[in-house]
Amino acid sequence: MFIESSKTDKYRDGAWVVVAVSGKVTCPVNMMNRYLDKARLSHDSPLFCQLSKTKYGYKARARGLSCTRLRELVIGAFRGIVTDLSRIGTHCLKSGGATAAANASGPDCLFLRLGRWSSVSAKDGYVRFSGFPFVCF
């Protein structure tokens, strides 16, 4: 997937993001394809936006998804799995993913580029190394 621009793109050259297909029910590629099928986005719609239910399915709204709504969705997804929901937020997902990737022992330069961090110190705030407990802040 190619991301043309974002607020974290310090070089302003876009970025390719590699997403693996697992074939499982939790596969991010399959989930994204199902979302795109239902959302029927126009070329100028934000990728993640509010959906309105219609009698023909769903229609994308022009406004993007708010941070508050995103947090509500994340908490809803973890309800019944996590005991203390007050410790869950959207940055927990980035921290957990970064930790899993860092512990997989890939090359650091590739890890920084794919994670879209501008420096090692920026990345280090998200990573918990093996043997240390995972904690959200």
Image (tube, rainbow, N blue to C red):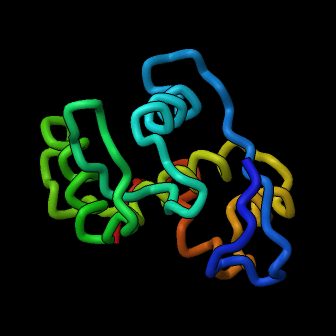
Task: Tell me the quarter of the picture where residue 13 sits.
Answer: bottom right
Which quarter of the rendering shows the C terminus?
bottom left
Q: Is residue 75 left or right of residue 32?
A: left
Instruction: Measuring from the top left, give residue 50's x and y in whole percent.
Output: 31, 57
Note whether 79 is above or below 133 in the view shown. above
Residue at image position (79%, 54%) is 16
Q: Is residue 109 left or right of residue 40?
A: right
Instruction: Measuring from the top left, give residue 119's x and y in whole percent.
Output: 74, 80
Residue at image position (44%, 56%) is 48
- Closer-to-camera residue (75/64): 64
Furthest residue in direction top, as rendered: 23
Residue at image position (24%, 70%) is 68
Task: Tell me the quarter of the picture where residue 20 sits.
Answer: top right
Instruction: Measuring from the top left, give residue 89's x and y in whole percent.
Output: 30, 63
Residue at image position (22%, 41%) is 53
Instruction: Measuring from the top left, give residue 8's x and y in whole percent.
Output: 65, 78
Q: Is residue 133 left or right of residue 66?
A: right
- Closer-to-camera residue (93/100): 93
